[in-house]
Amino acid sequence: MHYSDPYGLFGIEDIPTIPQPVVDFSAGFGDTLSFGLTDMARDQLGTNGSVDKCSASYTGGEVSGVLVSTAIGGAAGWRAAGTKGWGKEFSHWIPNRKGGPRSLWNGNYVTKVEHALSDPYRYRFMPRTWKEANPMPNTVIQQWNRIPNVYKGGAAGAAIGVAGAATNSD
């Protein structure tokens, strides 16, 4: 689309501009989520001088980028926690017998084998021959396997967001 001003009624000062805080926030947000690719693109286009990376708005964009990355990771973890299905059991992080709620905030749907290898209470009900072939892992691995995937995903998303923000420093 082409614009023209044959009568000269529209001056250059009348062109609307984007407020500087919006420019800085958007750049910080994009630079964080893209691991600095948007920063490199602005360098190539010669427009990076219009961004104030020292402003509070740029920092706010970076923080928002980390928060969005954390939320995306948490959502992926929620999905990875699974749904009830054939051959799956709910494995609580805080067991039901100790007041833990039955929610994806407190566990994951896993196979009977995964459940038995992460929950000593469930393990004790497995056949002796199975136990001989499948020794219980150490407590750290048991706890790691029991932590709800929503938290692991959120932590991974936060780490990615922080790493993306770290690439923005000059």
Image (cartoon, helix red, strand yellow):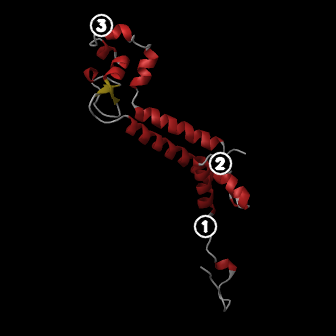
Please name the residue shown 36% across and 7% down the image: 132
Callout 1: few (<14), some (14-19), or many (20+) C-alpha neighbours within 10 Å?
Answer: few
**Residue picked out by circle 1:** 18
Horizontal side, residue 141 vs residue 124: left or right: right
Instruction: Give, as a three-letter code, the residue at label 1.
Output: Ile
Can residue 73 be seen in the rendering of this structure?
yes
Q: Is residue 107 above or below residue 30?
A: above
**Residue 52 seen in this snapshot:** no
Residue visible at 58% across and 51% down? 29
Which of discs 3 and 2 lies nearer the camera? The answer is 3
In 3D space, how far apart are the residues under numbered discs 3 and 2 (Cα atoms)?
55 Å
- Rendered view: 128 above or below 82: above
The amino acid on which the numbered mark 2 sits, given as a three-letter code, is Gly
Q: Quadrant of residue 151?
A: top left
Q: Which label belongs to residue 36? A: 2
Residue nearer the viewer, 69 or 145: 145
Q: x%, y% of residue 43?
A: 72, 56
Q: CA distance from mark 1 to mark 3?
A: 70 Å
Q: Position of residue 113 (x, y in %)?
A: 34, 20
Q: In the structure shown, which secondary structural element does the residue marked by tag 1 occupy?
A: loop
Looking at the picture, how far across and down is residue 55, in whole percent? 65, 53
Q: Residue at x 66, y 91 (%)?
A: 6
Residue holding disc 3: 128
**Label 1 vs label 2, nearer the camera:** 2
